[in-house]
Amino acid sequence: MTFRMPLLAHSHQPSRRSARQPSHQPSHQPSHQPVRLSSAVVGALLVLSATTTLAIDARPAHAQGTRDFAWEGSIPRGRWLYVRNLNGAVRVERASGAKAEVTAEKRVKRGSADDVRIEVKTLANDDILICAIWTENTTCDEEGYRTRGNSWNRRSEVSVEFTVRLPDGVKLVSSSVNGGIQIEGATSEVEASTVNGSITASSTGGPVRASTVNGGIEVRMRELGSGELEFETVNGSIEVELPADVNAELDMRTVNGRVSSDFPLTISGRINPRHIRATLGTGGPRLKLSTINGSVEIRKR
């Protein structure tokens, strides 16, 4: 049967909602997948996480000296800026002018700041790629990191904190592994991914995609585009704020948490309080929100 409901019921096994944290198109569209890592990079990060306290908060830390890296340049509207990190947060804000600015500060607990280099590449169609690199055998491109062998320096404990000032109309891909991502002031398409950290991402345009494993997700956008949008975590809640006149197909699921919506939903078939498939408005792009431990919420702008 088909009916409409303004608010969805709680799961029969709710959990306390996790605390919120402040939260290519050179020749083709980005893959819309989390940052890809080779097995050697993953192994190195496991070593790193066992020997240091990792920066998993998107909030800016206290300044520790001068900036270790600074880049400024023009990126045409509709093109992509990629900022990739492995250990540390990424914070994005709106640029005051037409040029993009990216700065980075290295935080050293052990070893040397020289253990990490930051590379800038101009890709096809004037896209820009900026990556923090920890080993000589590691490379980075618009799809993610790759490495040959396992040359991680176990005595090095260096994190990198990126600050990005994004001009109007420029699309953004931002990723980390051990670090949160905070994006404010974007005006176009956004993709954000990490493993250990929360994500907050806001765009006055859109669409926005976000994924993490250990952390919550908060997203605000005004445009959904035409493709599928995914918001995925394992340990954390998800909140997505959409325009009041949104039209979309909705897929929301959790195991330990609640599912709720500010919008009236048209639901067909059997109701599962922990997995809801529904239509918003007249239907449109598919929105998938999925977590294991946390709540899933759709909010109206």
Image (cartoon, rainbow, N blue to C red):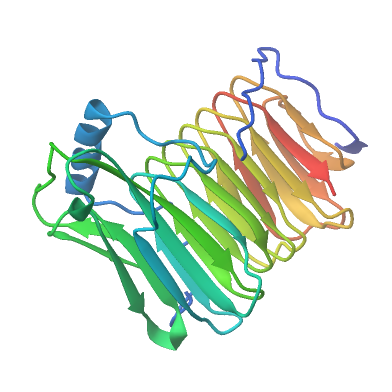
Residue under the image location 85 percent in, 43 percent down = 266
Q: Nearer the viewer, residue 108 or 49?
A: 108
Q: Nearer the viewer, residue 212 or 232?
A: 212
Work out whether residue 245 can be spotted.
Answer: yes
The quadrant in which residue 238 appears is: top right
Residue under the image location 91 percent in, 38 percent down = 4
Work out whether residue 143 can be spotted.
Answer: no
Pick out the residue farthest to the front: 65
Residue 198 coordinates in the image, percent (x, y): 53, 38
Q: Nearer the viewer, residue 148 or 268?
A: 148
Q: Is residue 183 left or right of residue 107?
A: right
Q: Is residue 7 left or right of residue 211?
A: right
Residue under the image location 8 percent in, 51 percent down = 149
Q: Is residue 37 above or below residue 111?
A: below
Residue 11 coordinates in the image, percent (x, y): 71, 18
Q: Is residue 117 above or below residue 276?
A: below
Residue 79 coordinates in the image, percent (x, y): 54, 79
The quadrant in which residue 191 appears is: bottom right
The N terminus - image quarter: top right
Residue 94 coordinates in the image, percent (x, y): 65, 64
Q: Is residue 127 left or right of residue 39?
A: right
